[in-house]
Amino acid sequence: MQAYSDLAFYQYQLGDLASAESSCNSALQLQLIANCFAPATYSLLGLIAAALHKYCEALHFHQVAVDTVRSRRLEENEAVAVLYTNLRMAWADLSLPIPALYWCEQIALSCQLKLLPPNHPDLLTTYTNIAEIYNTIGKYTKARTYYERSLDIQKQILPNSHKDIAGTLLGLSLVCEETGEYKDALKYIQKAQRVILDSDSYDYIDLIPSYLGMASIYEHLSK
């Protein structure tokens, strides 16, 4: 039973999705026969389905995983937080930002804040995901708040020249531009450029978004 689960995860990591799906279904069948607790298996089936672009199927599996945990009224832990995050991802894959936001901000984040230190990488990922959802639905002030929280953690745990920092700075620039705060937008985009240029492995292609962003901001400032 565990061997099938381990094999499925290994095959998923290798990108052998058909084999991973088969192994995971075998694991699930054995777990159901033995009346075993199987949220991780459902969650892995959800990840495999998403990788196969079967997004409705992925949502079903992730929802079953979460419902299985919640029906047992178990104490939340980091593994449960991952299940919540995966369910958020399933809603996002279906381009449904409101339920994605609910599972990310109200459920996953609330769980993580109880369990994790304030500079944990998982919190960084969740803050960024929430920022991107708020950006998608046009709530730019909220998006900025979460991008700023992401940036604060990145500055604590990443090298100053890490490209992820540049990505967050670009996100901040975009939301500031949307709210008409063009000087702040320009400040963030210039910082992003400096981070990229200081990186040991940057490619000139990496600078294209910042140049395009600058052009847009200067156009606004000239009006």
Image (cartoon, grey):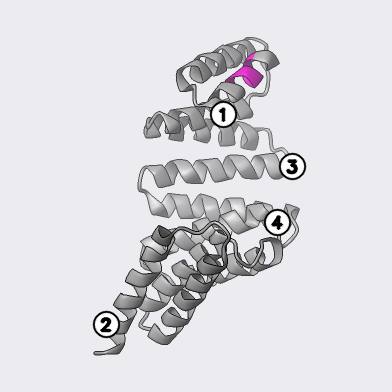
What residue do we see at 50% from left, 46% from top? 88
Circle 2: residue type: Glu
Q: Do the residues labelled 1 and 2 touch (CB within 8 Å)?
A: no
Camera sees residue 144 = no
Q: Of the residues tagged 3 and 2, which is closer to the observer?
A: 2
Query: Residue 105, position in %: x, y?
Result: 55, 57
Q: Of the residues tagged 3 and 4, which is closer to the observer?
A: 4
Mark 2, other Cα within 10 Å: few <14 / some 14–19 / many ≥20: few
Q: Kindly identify which numbered label has been placed on residue 75.
A: 3
Pointer 1 residue:
13
Q: Nearer the viewer, residue 77 or 180?
A: 180
Mark-to-mark CA distance, 3 and 2? 53 Å
The picture quadrant where one finds residue 23 is top right
Mark-to-mark CA distance, 3 and 4? 20 Å
Q: Of the residues tagged 2 and 4, which is closer to the observer?
A: 2
Mark-to-mark CA distance, 2 and 4? 39 Å
Pointer 2 residue:
219
Please say if 104 is above or below 6.
below
Q: Is mark 2 on a helix, strand or loop?
A: helix
Q: Is mark 4 on a helix, strand or loop?
A: loop
The picture quadrant where one finds residue 136 is bottom left
Left or right for 212, reference 39: left
